[in-house]
């Protein structure tokens, strides 16, 4: 025992279970990117509708994240983690037999909801089970494995798409899910952060409606219905926040955002994901269209960024355990993100492998520096009993950033390419213009995030 109440063996078992569960989410997203062209050809849809394959996944995730985090804090983190892992596997297998594009989207929605259960509990269990002097390392290991999923996804997805077809790749999720379920079954304890408290169903309904409306409006912002739905969603969100501040046991502790460290760290997270998530979506299409590469070859190139991330993340997570000024690493990471996004302005219709590789290397280094330190800062910036909600909130912020990133991508496509969004030599020039516009906006977002990362305030080791 090391003061946490858990043995090193129990800590290792939990880390193995959470890491295996955490690899599923990035696999599901990045594998599909290399199959978008094949899915579009089979179902006859263009690039804007293809963006929905990932968008609905993250929409479901962001809607369900906070309620599931709260439910897990009350009923048990391990139980909710295991339930989400099992449901992901079932939905993925069903999606492999999709008879239509819309059925595929429905299964992606289910997978997104189930992934919310995994994402909102995995890191919280690590924070709860590992001692303070090993938390940064453990979070870094979990983050590293998630990035390993990002690395393996394009390779697995591209190879299977070329050799067998896009449906086959969804079957690879089951072994990961089964191993995670088996390992978590050997972790003897259930972790309840707020046992005996009640579930806030009214707050849950208000929160889910607010997020569903606002995120849907954001995704459809270029359509005639998009702006009214977005405004309605923000209005419901305002009402929800007022309710959550008044109720004694809310589904989300909105009061956490009163702390400058927590609030600005969350904003930096949103700006980071909002500026960078669509990179794999755009580069997957760029490499296979303008670069005229196979899905397999594109997958191996896209492997560069997450491979670097997975190598660097645990190192910077461990460094964060020792460094005194907690602002340095997240701010440095955001600054390197800005440098990577600026490089997109040099992409042209003349394919350059060197340019693509340089972008991926820069963004991989940036993420390796930023991710674990920022995550640990957010989760340790609130009282212990709120760590479940803080984990869910951080995941919501990440997923909202992802949603924003994909919505921005879809809006740029709609504005520049309109309905003629099928990629062919006649539209390559417009597609590159879309990339330039998207990442000019993303650069500005990450520049603001860099300033906020430094202005968040310091948090010494003793504070944690």
Image (cartoon, rainbow, N blue to C red):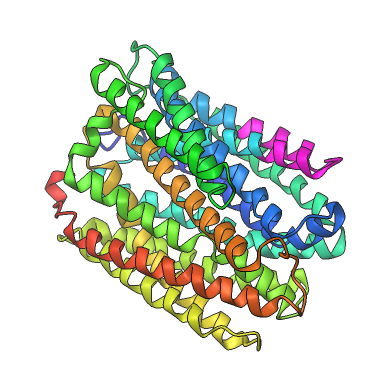
Above or below, 380 against 304 in this view is: above
The quadrant the N terminus occupies is top left
The quadrant the C terminus occupies is top left
Counting from the top left corner in percent of width and height, residue 12 is at 45, 42
Counting from the top left corner in percent of width and height, residue 50 is at 70, 55
Secondary structure mostly seen in magenta is helix
Residue 90 covered by magenta stretch = yes
Counting from the top left corner in percent of width and height, residue 10 is at 43, 35
Q: Which residues are magenta?
A: 85-108
Q: How many marks?
A: 0
Residue 422 covered by magenta stretch = no
Q: Looking at this view, name the residue that lies furthest to the front.
A: 224
Q: Quadrant of residue 321?
A: bottom left
Above or below, 288 against 255 in this view is: below
* Residue at 57 percent of width and 80 percent of height: 356
> Taking 459 as reference, is 128 left or right?
right
Q: Quadrant of residue 231?
A: top left
> Taking 258 as reference, is 57 left or right?
right
Which of the two residues, 188 or 178, is positioned nearer the viewer here?
178
Is there any visible trace of residue 190 in the rendered image?
no
Above or below, 328 against 60 in this view is: below
* Residue at 59 percent of width and 49 percent of height: 223
* Residue at 46 percent of width and 81 percent of height: 343
Above or below, 347 against 11 in this view is: below
* Residue at 43 percent of width and 15 percent of height: 201
> Taking 105 as reference, is 255 left or right?
left
Counting from the top left corner in percent of width and height, residue 2 is at 27, 38
Is there any visible trace of residue 242 in the rendered image?
yes
């Amino acid at each position: 025992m090391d003061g946490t109440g858990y043995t090193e063996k129990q800590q290792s078992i939990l880390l193995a279970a959470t890491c295996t569960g955490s690899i599923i989410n990035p696999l599901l997203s990045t594998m599909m990117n290399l199959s978008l062209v094949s899915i579009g050809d089979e179902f006859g849809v263009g690039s804007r509708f293809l963006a929905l394959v990932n968008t609905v996944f993250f929409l479901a995730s962001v809607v369900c994240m906070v309620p599931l985090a709260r439910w897990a804090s009350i009923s048990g983190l391990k139980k909710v983690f295991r339930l989400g892992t099992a449901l992901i596997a079932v939905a993925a297998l069903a999606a492999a037999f999709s008879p239509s594009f819309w059925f595929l989207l429905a299964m992606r929605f289910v997978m997104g909801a189930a992934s919310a259960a995994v994402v909102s509990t995995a890191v919280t269990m690590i924070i709860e089970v590992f001692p303070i002097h090993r938390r940064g390392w453990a979070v870094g290991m979990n983050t590293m494995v998630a990035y390993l999923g990002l690395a393996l996804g394009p390779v697995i997805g591209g190879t299977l798409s070329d050799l067998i077809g896009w449906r086959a790749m969804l079957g690879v999720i089951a072994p990961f899910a089964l191993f995670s379920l088996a390992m978590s079954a050997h972790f003897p304890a259930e972790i309840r952060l707020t046992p005996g408290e009640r579930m806030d169903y009214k707050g849950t309904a208000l929160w889910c409606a607010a997020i569903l409306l606002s995120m849907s409006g954001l995704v459809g912002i270029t359509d005639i219905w998009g702006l009214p739905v977005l405004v309605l969603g923000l209005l419901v969100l305002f009402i929800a926040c007022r309710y959550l501040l008044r109720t004694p046991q809310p589904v989300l502790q909105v009061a956490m955002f009163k702390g400058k460290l927590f609030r600005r760290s969350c904003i930096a997270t949103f700006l980071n994901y909002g500026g960078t998530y669509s990179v794999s979506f755009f580069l997957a299409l760029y490499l296979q269209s303008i670069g005229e590469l196979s899905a397999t070859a594109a997958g191996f190139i896209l492997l560069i960024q997450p491979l670097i991330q997975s190598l660097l993340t645990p190192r910077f997570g461990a460094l964060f355990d020792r460094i005194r000024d907690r602002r340095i690493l997240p701010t440095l990471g955001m600054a390197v993100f800005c440098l990577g996004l600026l490089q997109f302005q040099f992409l042209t219709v003349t394919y350059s492998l060197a340019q693509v590789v340089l972008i991926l290397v820069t963004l991989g280094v940036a993420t390796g520096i930023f991710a674990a330190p920022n995550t640990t800062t957010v989760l340790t910036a609130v009282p212990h009993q709120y760590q479940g909600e803080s984990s869910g909130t951080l995941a919501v912020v990440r997923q909202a950033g992802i949603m924003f990133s994909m919505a921005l991508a879809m809006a740029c496509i709609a504005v520049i390419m309109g309905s003629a969004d099928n990629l062919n030599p006649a539209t390559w020039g417009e597609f590159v213009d879309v990339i330039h516009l998207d990442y000019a906006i993303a650069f500005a977002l990450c520049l603001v995030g860099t300033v906020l990362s430094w202005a968040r305030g310091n948090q010494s080791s003793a504070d944690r």
